C-alpha cells in the first residue's frame, strides 16, 4: 500500500502560479511512476503529467505543455507539479497517483495507476 497526500492547491488569478506537492508513504517511493490528473466539475478525470520512477522521463497533456512541470524528490518521497500561466480552464481538483512500474514508463491512463490521493482544489479566477 502507498498513501498519497496532496497539498498546495488554492485560489489564484489567471496568469498566476501554484506548486502542488504529493507526499507518499508506505512503500519505496522510487519504485513508483507518478502521475497527476485533474477533474473539473461535470467532466471526467483527465491526465495532466507523469514522471518515471527515477525522474528521467516525463510526459504531459498537450493542454499543459510549456506551462506545467512535474518533478520528484525521491529522498523526500514527494512529487511536485509546478503550474505557471494558469488559466480559468485549469480549475479542477488535482489528484496524484502512483503505479509500481520500472524503467522509464510514464503511464498516461487513469486505469494504469494503483494508488490515488484525495485531491486538492485549484481554482483560477479570470
Image: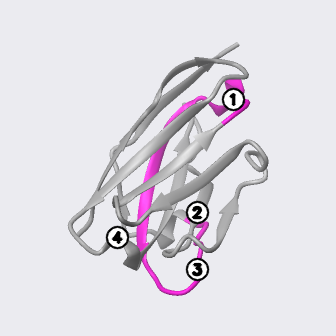
On the image, the x and y values in percent for residue 13 come to 64, 15
Q: Which mark is residue 42?
A: none
The image quarter in which residue 28 lies? bottom left
The span from disc 1 to disc 4 (Cα, nearest Å) is 29 Å
Q: CA distance from mark 1 to mark 3?
A: 27 Å
| Mark toward the start of the polypeptide (2 vs 4) | 4
Label of residue 50 in the image: 2
- Check if mark 2's residue and mark 4's residue have beta carbons within 8 Å: no
Give the image location of residue 79, x and y in percent. 45, 55
Which badge, 3 or 2, is on the more N-terminal residue? 2
Q: Give left or right: position of 8 versus 36.
A: left
Q: Secondary structure at mark 2?
A: strand
Residue picked out by circle 3? 105
Q: Earlier in the sequence, mark 3 or mark 4?
A: 4
Callout 1 environment at 10 Å: few (<14), some (14 to 19), or many (20+)?
A: many
Q: How many marks?
A: 4
Is 26 located above or below residue 4 in the figure? Answer: below
For the point 73% across and 30% down, the residue is: 85
Q: Are marks 1 and 4 in contact (CB under 8 Å)?
A: no
Q: Which residue is mark 4?
A: 29
Amino acid at each position: 500500500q502507498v498513501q498519497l497526500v496532496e497539498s498546495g492547491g488554492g485560489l489564484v488569478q489567471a496568469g498566476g502560479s501554484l506548486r502542488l506537492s504529493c507526499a507518499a508513504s508506505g512503500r519505496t517511493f522510487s519504485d513508483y511512476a507518478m502521475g497527476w490528473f485533474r477533474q473539473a466539475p461535470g467532466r471526467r478525470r483527465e491526465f495532466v503529467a507523469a514522471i518515471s520512477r527515477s525522474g528521467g522521463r516525463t510526459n504531459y497533456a498537450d493542454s499543459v505543455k510549456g506551462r506545467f512541470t512535474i518533478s520528484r524528490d525521491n529522498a523526500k518521497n514527494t512529487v511536485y507539479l509546478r503550474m505557471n500561466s494558469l488559466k480559468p480552464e485549469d480549475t479542477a481538483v488535482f489528484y496524484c497517483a502512483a503505479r509500481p512500474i520500472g524503467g522509464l514508463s510514464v503511464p498516461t491512463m487513469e486505469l494504469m495507476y494503483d494508488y490515488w490521493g484525495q485531491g486538492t482544489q485549484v481554482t483560477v479566477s479570470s
